[in-house]
Structures are given as C-alpha cells and as structure tokens.
Amino acid sequence: MKLEACGIDARDRVLTSAMAAASLVSSGERVLVCAGEGVVEAVENRGALPLDPEDETVANESVDAVIVGFHREFNFQRLAASANALHSGARLISTNSDPTYPTPGGLLPGNGSLTAAVAAAGKTEATIAGKPHRPIADLALNWLKLSRNSPGNIVVGDLPATDGLLAAELGFDFGLVLSGVTSAEESMSCEPTPDLIADDLRTLVELVLA
C-alpha cells in the first residue's frame, strides 16, 4: 500500500522476508506460524499448512517447522507452543534477526528479539531467511533469473549491515543512500564499503544512469 501511495504498481514484484522463510518449507508440511498474516499467506502459497500457536489442539499434533516473524501479538502462549514444537523435533525458521523495530514513538522489540526468546525456550538455533542471508538471496536470484556475480546489478539500501551484506551475498554492487539510518560520517568507514553513496534514491539513480 505504501508503494501504491507513491504511484508505484508493485503487485507481484515485491519479495519479502516472509516469502523467504516460507521457501524453506515444503508442500504438505505442517508449520506453526508464530508471526503475522503475511507469513500465513506465504506458507499457504507454498502448499504447506499453517498452524495457529494459540490453538490448544496444536500441542497434540506433529509440527515440521516453526516460523517466527514480527508481530505485536507475541505472548507466553505463543512462546510455549513454539518451544513445545521445537522440543518435539520441529526446525526453527525466522524471517529476520532485526533486534529492534522503529516506530514514531521509539524502538520496539524487533523480530530478532522474538526469535531469541523462542530459540532459547526451544533450546535450538534459528535459520534466518531474510536479508542478508542466503534464503532470500537465492529467492531473489530465482525471481530475477540471474546468477551470483552477474555484472551490472546493484543492491540499494540504507544499512550496510543488511543491504550491503546482501549485495555481497549476491555478488552485486552496493549503493548506499543516506536518507535512512546511516549518516554521511558513518558511510566513510562502514563495511562492506559501498560502491556508490548518494544522499537519496533519486540522486543514486542519477549517479547510476550517468
């Protein structure tokens, strides 16, 4: 909806961390979704069965995987159901490892914090699907019909620790925009080193076209 408000038709052109997480489950698997509706939809599109962690009958059923995604409804019941599934052999998948979630009122606990709680309670480690990790990189390459290290491609973002590392995972150039969380001063010493730095997206596009 945000892209539509900017006049951008992004239908069927947006790749999400929920889709990357769902790419790690197979058709027919039973997936406990400790996340929002986006993950539920992505799991269904994979042909897997999403299970509600607040459904008390789930505790008596087999679960193949638990997916954790950012949502504000996280509570003890969801944590306990997820941990129980992990203790019984389910694998843990997380959409992303962001420790915080920015809002106008300040930083909230992010999905990395929720995942840490589930991983600790379940005595396991999570596979992270979102950027800069391999699952979303593989999914992006498949969508774009490109191979790693394809020349002439660029990842644009405002955070070297995620966007820059995703570019490195893909073997693409990295274009850093300073209109987000990275300042001009920080850009001088960030890793990985950006191939291009611009004040905003418009300026970066002009640099690329030039």
Image (cartoon, rainbow, N blue to C red):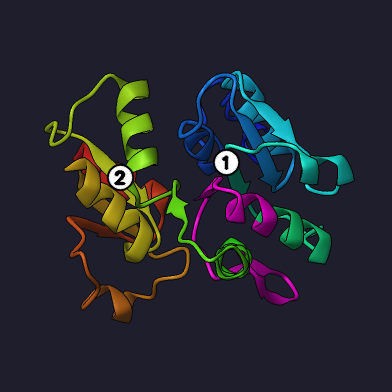
Is residue 72 something that shows in the picture?
yes
Labelled pair 1, 2 in contact (Cβ < 8 Å): no
- Determine the CA span between mark 1 and mark 2: 30 Å
- Is residue 106 shown in magenta? yes
Task: Name the quadrant containing residue 148.
Answer: top left
Q: In the image, residue 50 lies at what x, y percent?
A: 70, 32
Give the amino acid type for the residue marked by disc 1 in the picture: Ala
The quarter of the image holding the N terminus is: top right
Q: Residue at x 46, y 34 (%)?
A: 24
Residue in the foreground of this view, choosing between 125 and 23: 125
Q: Name the front one of labels 1 and 2.
A: 1
Q: Which mark is residue 65?
A: 1
- From this view, report whether residue 107 is shown above or below residue 171: below
- Residue at the limit of the structure toward the bottom, as seen here: 185
Of the residues under marks 1 and 2, which one precedes in the sequence? Answer: 1
Identify the element where label 1 is drawn.
Answer: strand
Number of on-image labels: 2
Residue 28 position within the rendered picture, expressed as x and y whole percent measured from the top left = 59, 20
Q: Nearer the viewer, residue 59 or 185?
A: 59
In the rendered view, does 200 fall on the left or right side of 115? Answer: left
Q: Amino acid at mark 2?
A: Val
Work out whether 108 lies above or below 133.
below
Please tell me which residue is depicted at 54% across the width and 47% down the height of the picture: 89
Which residues are drawn in magenta?
A: 83-110
Q: Residue at label 2? A: 155
Question: Which numbered marker is on residue 179?
Answer: none
Left or right: residue 133 versus residue 24 is left
Q: Is residue 161 shown in magenta?
A: no
What residue is shown at x 49% (from left), y 62% (from top)?
A: 124
> Visible in this render: residue 5?
no
